[in-house]
Image: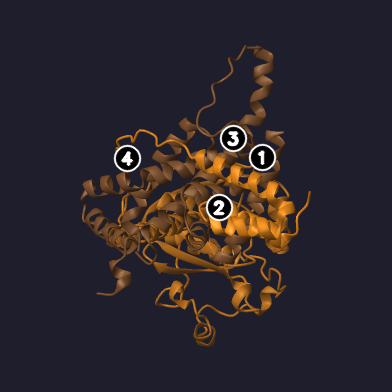
Amino acid sequence: MKLEPEIEELIWELAENPDDIESHNEFVRRYPQHREALAERVAMVKELRQSKPEEAPEEIFVPSPGKPRVEPNRFAIAAATTIFTACLGFAIFGAVQLYKAKQNDRLVFVESSAGADAAVSAPATEDAASSEMADMAAPPSAAPADRFKQQVNINASSAPLSTVLDMVARQAGVRIDSGNNFPNPTVNANYTNASALSVLQDLGRNFGFQVIVQTSSDALLIANSAYDPNAVRRTSSGGQPIPGGGTTGVPPSVQPSETDPAYRAGDPFAIDQGATGNPTLPEPGMSGPIRP
Amino acid sequence: MSEALDSPQSAAYDEDLRLLERLKGGDDEAFQSLYSRYFDKIYAIARGILLNDEEAADATQEIFTLVYRKARKFDGKAKFSTWLYRVAVNRSIQEARKLKGRRRESPLTQEVEDVPVEPEAPVGPLPAVQAAMQQLAPDDRAILTLFYWDELTLNEIGDSMGCSPNAAKTRLFRARERFRKHFEEASA
């Protein structure tokens, strides 16, 4: 039987206070029809309270705080972070320096495109089928200041100019850089006991580039066409005219004299031509490029 | 000194604070005193919620271990007993839910093994009470335990269960109605 909420709450209240005899009697007098419900509820609550578990034998508590907690030391964290950052920075710096060093060790030649200097390369490619090179020089042993004075031996037949320059660089232990659109014709070269600088200058005279010695072991090659659109090929040391013009197509007839002051004044690389204004002569034993 | 501070509850509260201060100072014997003072109440809570003596004993040890580890950080804003009851209720309810899951799985194993089980002698709560309590949710068992066995007030029950006294009263009313229903079924 479902009781009204007020009656239900009253019965719970009385059941939880069985010693309050007066209240019980008053409830029975007012609600005789709920007398049995009250008796059942009192018995139920009494049984519930009696069901409280007996006190268990108290066990001895053994504290087990577990693993001791390690409090982080802020100073140690800051120090470790600083050391780690320093190591990381040093490692990055070292890697960058190593990368730069490797880059510096590498010779960079800009390959000229086929026909970039048609006038020069055309005759050379006629017998380009066979290429024969001989690298007869000993490893460089001169001090850095003397590297361009290092004697080199070059014997190249139908080889690209870049290969010949590479041979010079390796034998002398120098670095040779070239600018953009640098010509790369096929050449024959035969130099014996000639200094690296004289070989480069002779090649430059014959194939239209200037040699700029930047440091004791670095040289920069710039094609004549790269700085002077009217540049012309100069004569070789033996006076043999070189078909010039390259991509500019300037005829040899406009070639200025080597001793022309105006020409020298406008030539930023005149230093390579010697103090007298004359082209640097090949050294003994230097036969110069052999044109096919 | 005021009357409130002279009351037994206030004295017990002060004694708890003194023991906690000693514990924070590294005196482990102070915790032994707290353990002795509250063991029975905590065991009763765990027993009422878990309805098993051994599990209740294990849970009681776990509760006191937890309290031992955390007691040094107890800020004293609430009564230590309230905080302790709350830890006990939460930990016991949590354990009861775990056990409920395990009991659901266990019958399959028993069927396979077909091991004859001797009927256990009724220990602790009377059969009808035990049967009715087993039908209740752990939360209902917790509030009935706190009210009828530990005889806490509605304010204390509210603090222990993380609710207001009015909410505790409502939850108590609903819990005992559910208990009455199951009790009457078990008694019939």
Secondary element type, mark 2? helix
| Kind of residue indicated by mark 1 | Phe
Classify 10 Å Cα crowding around label 1: few (below 14), some (14-19), many (20 and above): many
| Kind of residue indicated by mark 2 | Glu
Kindly report the distance in space between the C-alpha atoms of the residues bearing marks 3 and 4: 33 Å
Which colour denotes chain A? orange
* Residue at position x 68%, y 34% in the image: B187
Image depth: mark 4 or mark 2 in front: 2
The residue where tag 3 is placed is B130
Q: Chain of mark 1?
A: B
Q: Chain of mark 2?
A: A
| Kind of residue indicated by mark 4 | Ser
| Kind of residue indicated by mark 3 | Gln
Residue B57, percent from left and from top:
43, 35
The residue where tag 4 is placed is A64
Q: Is B40 drawn above or below residue A115 in the view shown?
A: above
Image depth: mark 4 or mark 1 in front: 1
Residue B139, percent from left and from top:
59, 49
The residue where tag 1 is placed is B183
Secondary element type, mark 4? loop
